[in-house]
Amino acid sequence: MDYTSLNVNSSTGKTPTTAAQSSGAADTQDRFLKLLVAQMQNQDPMNPMDNAQVTTQLAQIQTVTGVGTLNNSIQSLSGQFQQMQALQSVSLVGRDVTVPGNKVAVTDGKAQMSFDLADAADTVKLEVLNGAGAVISTQDLGAMKAGNQNYTWDASKSPETANLSFRVTATKNSNPVSTTTLMHDTVKAVSTTGSTLQLDLKNSGLVDYDKVRALG
């Protein structure tokens, strides 16, 4: 199990940029206060700043500082959430997931295939293709409702069982229905790239975590 790609700072719970952002907010406030003091020292004695002006400017810097602090807090929480999500996703290693894809894995003479229909269809056709892209099996599945569908293909009599893929075509009233082919795969490792959490799958390689449709 590979943990090296998880950038988690357990001692501080902060993202690497939090300290720099806090320093920047403090510098901004310090510069503002210096400018305000200089303005008061060099004001026209015959026309001095009134209390309302000073109060307004102080309120403005407090507002800016408060917004900056809130932004830093949100970014820190976001970083901690991403780290928690990465750690929790480690429990997926070794588990099966369903993701968009069209590869066919034959086990004990059978292959489980899934697909999603955007709308109900009058006719649905599933085709299994070999590595060269030639159709080696065609299954007419008839009418099907919208949503996720599963089909078990009997590959015991198929001349080929390796490097297979499948495609699904569907129509409703002679109009094409959008389909998304899905495949079952096994999680080998978890990886983080910037703010993106990815799963390293046995057959599909790296897939974004949010592409996972189902577990098991």
Image: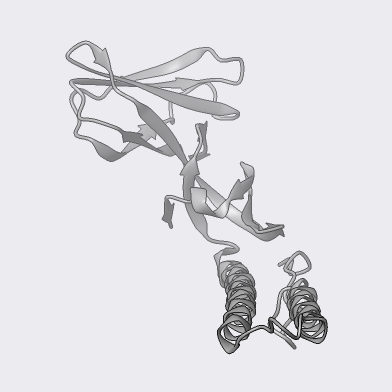
Looking at the rendered image, the quarter that the N terminus falls into is bottom right
The total number of labels drawn is 0
Which image quarter is the C terminus in? bottom left
Q: Quadrant of residue 109?
A: top left
Residue 10 position in % (x across, y down): 72, 84
In the displayed structure, does residue 112 sit left or right of residue 4?
left
Which residue is more in the foreground, 50 or 200?
A: 50
**Viewed as shown, does residue 28 lie left or right of 209?**
right
Q: Is residue 138 left or right of residue 76?
A: left
Image coloring type: one colour
In this rendering, the answer to whether 129 lies above or below 56 is: above
Picture layout, residue 22 above or below residue 216: below
Rendered position, 180 above or below 14: above
Q: Is residue 178 above or below residue 93?
A: above
In the rendering, at what x and y percent does residue 214 appear?
41, 54
- Residue sitting at x 62%, y 68%: 86
Question: What residue is at 56 percent from the left and 15 percent from the top?
Answer: 133
Can residue 212 be seen here?
A: yes
Residue 83 visible in the current orientation: no
Q: Quadrant of residue 42?
A: bottom right
Q: Position of residue 155 (x, y in %)?
A: 43, 30
Name the image quarter holding residue 161: top right
The residue nearer to you, when weighing 65 against 195, is 65
User: As drawn, is 108 to the left or to the right of 9?
Assistant: left
- 169 or 56: nearer the viewer: 56
* Residue that appears at 29% across and 32% down: 118
Most extreme residue toward the front is 46
Residue 107 image point, x, y percent: 49, 42
* Residue at 57% across, 69% down: 85
